[in-house]
Amino acid sequence: GLLEKGGYPHFMLKEIYEQAQAMKDCMRGRLLEQEKRVVLSAVTHHRERLLNAKRVIIVSCGTSWHAGLIGKQMIETFAKVPVEVEYASEFRYRNPVIDARDVVIAISQSGETADTLAAISLAKERGAFIFGIVNAVGSSIARITDTGTYIHVGPEIGVASTKAFTGQLTVLTMLALSLGKEKQTVSTTEYEEIVAELAVIPDKMERMLVFDKQIAELAKCYTYARNFIYLGRGYNFPVALEGALKLKEISYIHAEGYPAAEMKHGPIALVDAEMPVVVIATHHQLYEKTLSNIQEVKARKGRILAIVTEGDEVVKKLADNVIEVPATLACLSPLLTVIPLQLLAYHVAVMKGLDVDQPRNLAKSVTVE
Ligand code: G6P
């Protein structure tokens, strides 16, 4: 009933709104603001094993896989160790080259996904060290991993994952920072800057919820759509994938996420006046280049909805609609840019009269192959 949903009409909306609090819960006792550092006990306890990793392999599925793609960029940037991101379902059947010097990071909200469990077992047999990033305390994945960090965002009920994604990103950021600090591959200035900024992200998330009404209005114009394209670059390319996944899952509109520059190699052929294109164009990596992608879409009469940094005037002139997000560091921007995309998918589905919390053919946790 309404009571268990905390007064919200759906669990998904409740969980979108809970993200600021969930992120604080995730960082509690780990992000030490006064001391300007992060402490993950898993890293403290397994320092040698983690620092000696010649390679990191991330295995996961669905939304957790998207979080992994962002984690890869942070771990490579701050800890300078090569990272591969694999779909657990492919990894398990690929006879992968893996040995005792590899560290496998398994990301799973439920901790029960069959493919992820099987991928972990395989990696374990070959001697890899397994680090879990899990939400469900005491779940199967939490139990078979060698160590790990819970995301602690509380139970997630809506089938479409929301707060688990931002929780996973938070842990991945803290992990990348801890490893980078230990290895001295990240400068103290940069490390402290990210730590300080992480601490204020929950407030910025909270501030963004004022756009909920605007997004609900906007959603009305999109219920007709049969297809959507989502574009992003750098840290926000995986956010484009995640935005497209949210839309597919609950509003049954076909959507594709693409790295913006790759659009010219295919998806641009789809663009016409009927095609909504969501572009993440925050003031970060490759902003200028994203602007020219926006112009290319506009020249073909595509309908552009842009996610921009607060105060951006340039994109506002080009796009049909913009949603502003507070300024932040590039590596932390997915924590903010994903929120309007979650809300967009939610409202389009609600406008279409669909069952947001229990979309057809999907399960919250896929415990069979
Ligand atoms: C299912 C859920 C998704 C989730 C994926 C991976 O497909 O519907 O929301 O991202 O499984 O689940 P996990 O629990 O392993 O993160």
Image: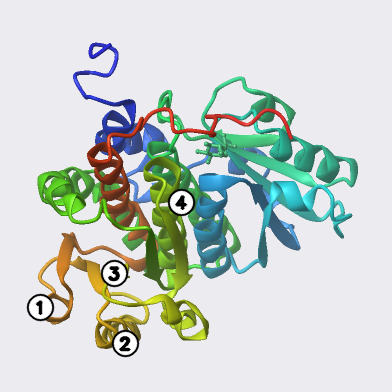
Task: Name the kind of residue labelled 2 in the image.
Answer: Glu
Identified at 31% across, 58% down, the residue is: 225
Point out the frontmost of discs 3 and 1: 3
Q: Residue at the spot x=41%, y=25% of the render?
A: 154
Q: How far apart are marks 1 and 2 (CA)?
A: 18 Å
Pinpoint residue 278: horizontal percent, then vertical percent.
31, 66
Is disc 3 in contact with disc 1, using a CB cutoff of under 8 Å?
no
Q: Reading the chain from its start, which is encountered first: label 4 or label 1?
A: 4
Q: How far across and down, in percent of the image, does residue 364 sit?
A: 52, 29
**Horizontal arrangement in the rendering, residue 336 relative to residue 366 (left or right):** left
SS category of the residue bearing label 1? loop
In the rendered image, which residue does mark 4 sit on?
245
* Label 1 or label 2, whichever comes before in sequence order: 2
Marks 2 and 3: which is nearer the front?
3
Q: Name the residue under label 1.
A: 313
- 305 above or below 27? below
Say which label, 3 or 1, has the lower sequence index: 3
> Which label number is shown at residue 296?
2
Crowding at mark 1 (Cα within 10 Å: few <14, some 14-19, many 20+): few
Give the residue at mark 3. 274
Which of the pair 18/158 is nearer the observer? Answer: 158
Disc 3 from disc 4: Cα separation: 20 Å
Q: Which amino acid does label 4 sit on?
A: Leu
Residue type marked 3: Glu
**Nearer-N-terminus badge (3/4):** 4
- Residue 19 at x, y = what percent? 30, 38
Residue 119 visible in image: yes
